Image: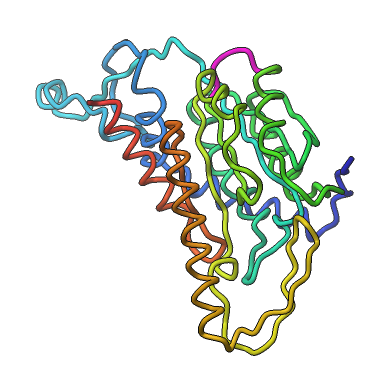
Amino acid sequence: MGNLKLLDDQLVAKVKGIQLRAKHLVNSSFAGEYLSAFKGEGIEFEEVREYQAGDDVRTIDWNVTARAGKPYIKTYRDERELTVIFLVDVSASGHFGSGEKFKQEVAAEITALLAYTALRNNDKVGLIIFSDHVEHYIPPKKGRGHVWRLIRDILSYQSNSRKTDLALPLDYLNRVVKRKAITFMISDFQGDAISDQMRVSCKRHDLIAISVADPREKTLPSVGYLELEDAESGEVVMVNTNSKGFLSRFFKMNKKRDRTLAHEFRKLGVDYIEVTTDDSYLEPILKFFHQREQRIRR
């Protein structure tokens, strides 16, 4: 079993920083993209009301606006209160980052962004932290304090397990969450990505895979001999990074793994978002929202 370490001043500051960045990013445009991507079906027109600061400009009723001389928007009633569940991998490979952030920190930031967006749209959010077993579960709820707890627990969780098993948290999800949920699985997917349990979960929930990778896992600098340790297995190998042949094989192996992973997710109908620790995760998520919205409109 892992544990939640006590919050020191540095960790509290980090949680608050993530919280502030997420709130800043969750502006009216981003919240509108989320609404279009996940609430595009099963909604009914409710009324027209005067535009207020923060409303999604895409909902403006231009006919009424022209007649009234000031902006009005269409409002809709969503008959479904959505549940959003985050499955976050805290196995050993998450404690790696060649730049300013570890993969686990990026996972916490993505969770914060999507959780605050869901909260703004009156949805409940919950969390399952996992490695090669389910480590920690927070049932879905609303409230800013609840989202703060999610961020804190992801950042502060210390697992004693090195490996990843993607099937077990999905099985747990299916047992504890009875209604269909939007499920974001955030991992580096260094374990077996596709399993029978994932196929079952795709039929019961709206499953989105978010892969968090570090650039040093894909390419290596030419600096001579290096010891590389597999975080999940603990195996250590010595490699010669001055060897062009080795660097080429290393690059091709990782490109093939990425293509295979994306192909397997596509076959299952699982949306797949790729982010890296050294680049913005906002653009890939917005691109995903746009693609979802286009599919709904077809």
Q: How many marks?
A: 0
Viewer-side residue, 99 vs 91: 91
Q: Quadrant of the C terminus?
A: top left
Classified by dominant secondary structure, the portion drawn in magenta counts as: loop
**Is 173 a magenta residue?**
no
First to last magenta residue range: 177-181
Residue drawn at the location 41% of the way across and 14% of the way down: 78
In the rendering, at what x and y percent does residue 218 appear? 54, 67
- The x, y position of residue 206, in whole percent, is 49, 26
| Residue 269 spot, x, y in % from top left | 42, 31
Q: Position of residue 57 (x, y in %)?
A: 27, 35
Quarter of the figure with the N terminus? top right
For image coordinates 51% across by 30% down, the residue present is 207
Residue 170 vs residue 38, the one in the foreground: 170
Instruction: Name the image quarter holding residue 226.
Output: bottom right
* Front-most of residues 172 and 68: 172
Foreground of the two, 44 or 48? 44
Say whether residue 230 is left or right of residue 182. right
Picture residue at 76% right of the left edge, 48% below the top = 163
Q: Is residue 152 above or below residue 70?
A: below
In the picture, residue 271 is in which quadrant? top left
In the rendered view, how is the structure colored? Answer: rainbow
On screen, residue 285 above or below 51:
below
At a point 75% along the width and 55% down the height, the residue shown is: 232
